[in-house]
Image (cartoon, rainbow, N blue to C red):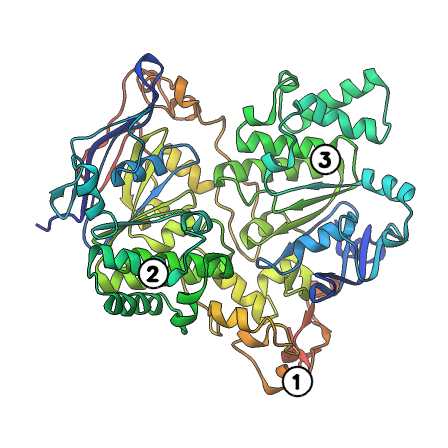
């Protein structure tokens, strides 16, 4: 049995303190094997990004409470590291690609300086070798003239080029795990295809495990083999992408799928949408959080909580799955 | 609506050779575009970032001056109107933007936001205005108890509903939606698209729907126009377009948009660096540098707009494409 590249078990996050605290992530557990891409899908505010930030240990220490059984990267628990130890892990073993490259990059350094800095801190302090690694990384994401990109400041690049540069920065130390948080949301369709293509190539080449966060099931289907659906802080379905699209088991997953507009020679009929709204996190109903919007719910759905098998790759948290 | 009535009615809005530039005419954002929107129908305007879609919307509202050409609204040129005439047109054409929170004033309650257009255009009296506001909120699926609340107290989907209500409160004939669902989650996007389709059916308004997402356009548009670098490359009925896109760029866009398979790059040069350096080159076909079907003539001569001839039921609907591939094939394409 292989050791998963990333193992998260029992991760919970609360915002605020005492009686007023709001639980935004509720008992999230999953494994991602080396070379595997897993999508984390859900609507805005369901806790996707909080999950990523908690894994990386980037949440502030005040006002936020994180609890977990363990978070392992290649079998090593990183959940109880101190700041100095954590710095050695971030960027080397696990890296993040953010949604907004414009705000995640430093405007006063060139792309080359920013990417080499990561390499020099983690891999090799030698300036010349870091420079070479930086150029190689820029080339690997598909830039034909990496020297030009290296000399450019972030504002001189287009949105797509910035995102590719950020991928080059995340990949420069060839981490075991990358977390991509909505990496293509702000981009148009041709740039999006290019970036997903490059990301997939690199991931296959280096055997990197990827947690791919997106609200767009279509994009997840294109880039991931497995998928996890999140609703109100809980994972409600885990399966492989193909299975989700052909046979979603949780009524919420099925609802999300039916919202995707379809392309075709004939104009599609009525768009279906999920009735009702996502409940406020401060005022979550007991039992299954989706019960009130679900057309299959029965009394026990709001009395007790259906649970997902923690470390299994497939499962559904529902009493009456489809 | 039958195709023949589509042909005979004069268009509600017609752009004739419209050009718009920025930076003292150094950057042509819209390049001699001809387009028309029929009463009560939806035109989907598609293109990647920077294609000039929003510049067209802004030129129609006279938020940015056009360089040349005409914008005919029910036969009258908007660009030649004085401020008084323009004010009357603005009541008839309303705009919904991409980011609802940025387009609503944070200091105004929903009630105040919806009251302002009515006051500005001097529509109704105090009592009927309140009635109109309640009615409009109801149309977009909001309760009147939202009147005293402020934009930040709503979710993104509700904010977009408020922005749509603000646009509808003056009873416009044409609604311009500029990427109005692009920043929303798919589930919320589905709700807003559903709302727009319902509104159009009930109110009979025409819609200029700007989007980079072809799947969204498929849901909502009767006609499709494809833009690239300021130029209109293809225009057609939605059914004809989606059953057989004619321009190589349109075909590439459809490849990008299909989410069924792993990301596949269409043939042609989609490198981002190339795109940037080619900005300065004045190629004769704007798409030549990326085109998989490029011929020598494409870099020498600007293509004409060809009308594709159909022999089946699509023959009534004009399907125009600006591409050298159709120089000789015009009339043979079926």
Q: Which residue is mark 3?
A: B167
Residue A232 x/y as whole percent: 37, 28
The chain letter under disc 3 is: B
* Nearest to the observer: residue B32 or residue A313: B32
Looking at the rendered structure, the secondary structure element under dot 1 is loop
Q: Is residue B165 visible?
A: yes
Please give the count of numbered marks on the rendered protein.
3
Q: Is residue A104 above or below residue A67?
A: below
Q: Residues within 10 Å of mark 3 (few under 14, many from 20)?
A: many
Do the residues indicated by labels 3 and 1 lie within the same chain of the protein? yes
Left or right of residue A187: residue B201: right
Q: Residue at x 67, y 34 (%)?
A: B164
Q: Residues within 10 Å of mark 2 (few under 14, many from 20)?
A: many
Disc nearest the viewer among 2 and 1: 2
Mark 2 to mark 1: distance in Å?
38 Å
Do the residues indicated by labels 3 and 2 lie within the same chain of the protein? no
Disc nearest the viewer among 3 and 2: 2
Q: Residue at x 43, y 22 (%)?
A: A280
Q: Residues within 10 Å of mark 1 (few under 14, many from 20)?
A: few
Q: Which residue is mark 1?
A: B300
Mark 3 to mark 2: distance in Å?
43 Å
The chain letter under disc 1 is: B
Looking at the rendered structure, the secondary structure element under dot 3 is helix
Q: Which residue is mark 2?
A: A168
Residue A238 x/y as whole percent: 27, 40
Which of the 4 image quadrants contains residue B324?
bottom right
The circle drawn on residue B100 is none
Q: Earlier in the sequence, mark 3 or mark 1?
A: 3
* Nearest to the observer: residue B100 or residue A111: A111
Residue B239 x/y as whole percent: 63, 57
């Amino acid at each position: 049995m292989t050791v998963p590249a990333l193992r998260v078990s029992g991760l919970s996050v609360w915002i605020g303190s005492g009686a007023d605290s709001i639980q935004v992530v509720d008992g999230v557990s999953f494994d991602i094997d080396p070379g595997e891409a897993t999508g984390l899908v859900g609507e805005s505010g369901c806790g996707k990004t909080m999950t990523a930030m908690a894994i990386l240990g980037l949440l502030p220490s005040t006002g936020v409470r994180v609890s977990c059984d363990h978070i392992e990267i290649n079998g090593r628990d990183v959940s109880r590291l101190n700041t100095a130890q954590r710095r050695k892990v971030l960027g080397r073993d696990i890296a993040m690609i953010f949604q907004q490259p414009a705000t995640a990059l430093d405007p006063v350094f060139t792309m080359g300086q920013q990417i080499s800095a990561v390499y020099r801190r983690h891999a090799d302090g030698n300036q010349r070798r870091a420079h070479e690694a930086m150029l190689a990384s820029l080339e690997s994401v598909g830039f034909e003239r990496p020297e030009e990109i290296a000399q450019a400041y972030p504002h001189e690049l287009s949105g797509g080029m910035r995102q590719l540069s950020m991928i080059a920065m995340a990949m420069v130390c060839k981490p075991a795990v990358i977390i991509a948080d909505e990496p293509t949301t702000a981009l148009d369709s041709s740039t999006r295809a290019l970036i997903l293509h490059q990301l997939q190539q690199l991931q296959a080449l280096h055997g990197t495990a990827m947690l791919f966060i997106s609200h767009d099931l279509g994009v997840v289907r294109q880039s991931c083999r497995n998928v996890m659906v999140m609703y109100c802080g809980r994972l409600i379905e885990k399966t492989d992408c193909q299975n989700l699209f052909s046979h979603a088991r949780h009524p919420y997953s099925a609802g999300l799928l039916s919202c995707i507009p379809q392309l075709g020679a004939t104009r599609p009929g009525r768009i279906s949408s999920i009735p009702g709204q996502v409940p406020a996190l401060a005022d979550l109903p007991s039992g299954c959080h989706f019960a009130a919007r679900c057309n299959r719910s029965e009394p026990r759905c709001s009395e007790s909580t259906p649970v997902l098998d923690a470390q299994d790759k497939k499962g559904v948290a529902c009493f009456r799955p489809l | 609506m039958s195709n023949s009535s589509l042909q005979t009615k004069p268009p509600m809005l017609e752009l004739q050779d419209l050009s718009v530039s920025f930076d003292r005419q150094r950057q042509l954002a819209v390049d001699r575009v001809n387009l028309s929107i029929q009463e009560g129908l939806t035109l989907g305007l598609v293109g990647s970032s920077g294609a000039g879609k929003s510049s067209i919307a802004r030129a129609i509202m006279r938020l940015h001056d056009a360089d040349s050409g005409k914008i005919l609204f029910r036969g009258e040129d908007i660009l030649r109107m004085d401020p008084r005439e323009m004010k009357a047109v603005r009541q008839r054409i309303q705009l919904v933007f991409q980011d609802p929170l940025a387009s609503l004033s944070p200091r105004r309650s929903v009630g105040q936001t919806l009251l302002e257009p009515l006051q500005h255009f001097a529509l109704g009296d105090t009592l009927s205005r309140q009635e109109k506001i309640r009615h409009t909120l109801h149309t977009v699926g909001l309760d009147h108890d939202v009147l005293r609340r402020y934009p930040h107290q709503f979710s993104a989907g509700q904010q977009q509903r408020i922005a749509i209500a603000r646009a509808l409160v003056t009873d416009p004939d044409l609604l311009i939606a500029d990427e109005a669902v692009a920043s929303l989650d798919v589930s919320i996007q589905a709700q807003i698209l559903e709302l727009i389709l319902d509104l159009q059916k009930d109110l009979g308004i025409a819609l200029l729907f700007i989007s980079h997402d072809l799947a969204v356009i498929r849901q909502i548009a009767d006609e499709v126009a494809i833009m690239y670098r300021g130029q209109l490359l293809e225009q057609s009925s939605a059914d004809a377009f989606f059953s057989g896109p004619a321009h190589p760029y349109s075909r590439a866009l459809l490849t990008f948009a299909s989410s069924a398979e792993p990301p596949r790059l269409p043939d042609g040069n989609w490198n981002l660096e190339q795109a940037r350096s080619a900005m300065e080159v004045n190629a004769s076909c704007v798409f030549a540098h990326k085109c998989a079907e490029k011929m020598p003539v494409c870099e020498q001569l600007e293509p004409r707009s060809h009308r594709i001839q159909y022999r089946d039921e699509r023959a009534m609907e004009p399907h125009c494409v600006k591409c050298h591939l159709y120089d000789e094939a015009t009339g043979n394409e079926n």
